[in-house]
Image: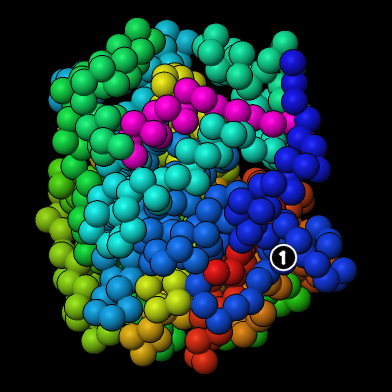
Amino acid sequence: MRTIPTFRRLASWCALVPALAACAAQSAAPSDVSAAAGKRIEGDAGMVAASSPEAAAAGAMILRQGGNAADAAVAVAFALSVTDISQTGLGGGGALTYFDARARRASHLSFYPRTGSDAAWSEAPGPAATRGAGRAAAIPGMVAGLLETHQRFGRLPRAQVMAPAIRLAREGFTVTPLLSRTIASARARLESDSAALALFIPGGEPLRPGERLVQPVLASTLEAIAASGSGAFYEGAAAERLASKVRAQGGLIQPEDLRDFPVADAVPLCTEWRGYTVLSAPPPMGGATVLQMLQMADAAGVADAGGLTARPEAVATLAGVLRAAQADGGWWRGDPAVLGVPARGVASAAYARERSATLASRVADTVRAGDPWPHDKDALPSACAMYPYPSATRSTDTLPPPGPDQDGGSFTSHLSVVDADGNAVSATTTVGVLFGSGVYVDGFFLNSSAANLDARTRGPNRYTNSTMAPTLILENGAVRLVIGAAGSQYIQPAITQVTLRILAFGEDPGRAIAAPRIQAAPRGRDVEVEPGFTPEVYAALVARGYRPLSRVADIQFGGVHGVMVRRDGHRIGIADPRRDGVAVRQ
């Protein structure tokens, strides 16, 4: 029997987690009761922005209990594993960039899914119809990464930080329209597992908005992790169940692959841009593409246009920037431990100027990857002296053809946190496509990240590729913007466009995140355009040779969540209206 949440239940949740943006504490004023409620919040202390109201509330509550940005981010990420389960979860992975305000220094941790020791990881998986869902699942790094983050940077006990997620799983939460839609659209994947089918499609009908989702099995898994740490997930009976379920569905994960998942502690990629220090995620994550897009936007004059919505030439030029940077990102990728990835060269201002000079007045059907190798050993800007990301070893002497097209889905989850002391976290997590591989075990879904590997990047014992780009932007050694996005190949263009609007054009953060965006892929001349641009923008795109395609402003264009810190310390939290998320102040 389905349970519709009553006002009494919602009121009790508001009392339990008073930071929830949808509750009376932040929506008492009539002007806040609108479709944009919680999407833009101001405050002078801690701030959390995330893709689920309950998860954002969990982070704000942890800040109120004395936790720092790392504690809050870990609490939010575990809570998202419950409430944003179609996009992220314990069976997935992610990456985060952390800023220590006292040390005035950033760190980067990557815990994206990786392959195991089986030599078959080097082989093409074959047609999807014959390989089984398990072949898409790589070893999940979410639990290892979040616990490592908490151990290194947090201050509260693990059980306290995980308590909100456990409560959400045990007591349930209200299904949103977006979650209901994702369940319906992924029905075939969910129907492949009887337990997932009974939970998400009870009685043969997908959960409806307003119904309550209770996940007792997931709650038990979270409780075990809270009590015993990573061993409760990566060792013993839990590891045996996970590996057995994957192998039964054609996968390659072995129990021994799960032990001691290696969280990558990397130097963040760094560049200087318009007086700011921009830090983002190194390979195999996609931060280099964000840095390249910002640098190219500057070199090509887009950053000086004063805006985008009514600037035809700026938008048409930006389309070329997005195509060129994504062409580079589609090829220069892979696990840097085993592949030469010239990320430092891709992110350099000199390479951006070189690439910008190739932007044609008339567009080609395909934009080929450029050659950043000559710039991979360029001296870093002085602002990046403490972030000496290493130059790569060149693995080819010939310019390669364009990389393969990336998956067209728009999934993943992002959170941004700044605490009262100025510590900050930008974190992106995912299970891949909706509900990952569909392999469901112990209350969570295994990722589909192994599908990101191709003939050039696949192999044993390596991280898979991602467009994730959790980003921090500093000014004079302090955080000015914490930003990131969900949305597969829409992640980097979304971060770039919102950053340009806030920091280059001076737009209000709430307006910037809601403003229309474009997306232009390296192959083909189609440009996806959200409504809101002036007619002259469409005309300028056509004049350049593009084919504008009208797109509805929804989940397809990603989900940006961020926190801007003004020079006076005042914070503005922003959540993308294209998704369910909110910003919540401490």
Q: Position of residue 563 (x, y in %)?
A: 53, 71
User: Is residue 108 depicted above or below 349 in this figure?
Assistant: above
Along the line of sight, the residue nearer the viewer: 563 or 249: 563
Total numbered labels: 1
User: Is residue 269 depicted above or below 17 in this figure?
Assistant: below
Q: Position of residue 83 (x, y in %)?
A: 57, 40
Specify the farthest residue to the left: 393
Please indicate, yes or no, whether residue 159 appears anywhere in the rendered image: yes
Which of the 4 image quarters holds residue 199?
Answer: top right
Along the line of sight, the residue nearer the viewer: 395 or 16: 16
Determine the residue positioned at 83% across, 61% down: 34
- Secondary structure mostly taken by the magenta-highlighted segment of the chain: helix
SS class, disc 1: helix
Q: Please indicate whether residue 96 sits to the left or right of residue 261 in the image.
A: right
Q: Quadrant of the N terminus?
A: top right
Determine the residue positioned at 46% across, 59% down: 62
Q: Please indicate whether residue 307 sits to the left or right of residue 295 in the image.
A: right
Residue 10 covered by magenta stretch = no
Please indicate, yes or no, whether residue 504 appears anywhere in the rendered image: no
Which residue has dot 1 on it? Answer: 25
| Amino acid type indicated by mark 1 | Ala
Q: Position of residue 379 (x, y in %)?
A: 19, 79
**Circle 1 crowding by C-alpha within 10 Å: few under 14, some 14–19, many from 20:** few
Determine the residue positioned at 50% across, 86% down: 569
User: Is residue 576 depicted above or below 4 in this figure?
Assistant: below
Q: Please indicate whether residue 222 sits to the left or right of residue 56 in the image.
A: left
Specify the farthest residue to the right: 30
Along the line of sight, the residue nearer the viewer: 398 or 489: 489
Determine the residue positioned at 30% across, 37% down: 227
Stretch of the chain drawn in magenta: 209-226
Which color scheme does this rendered protein use?
A: rainbow
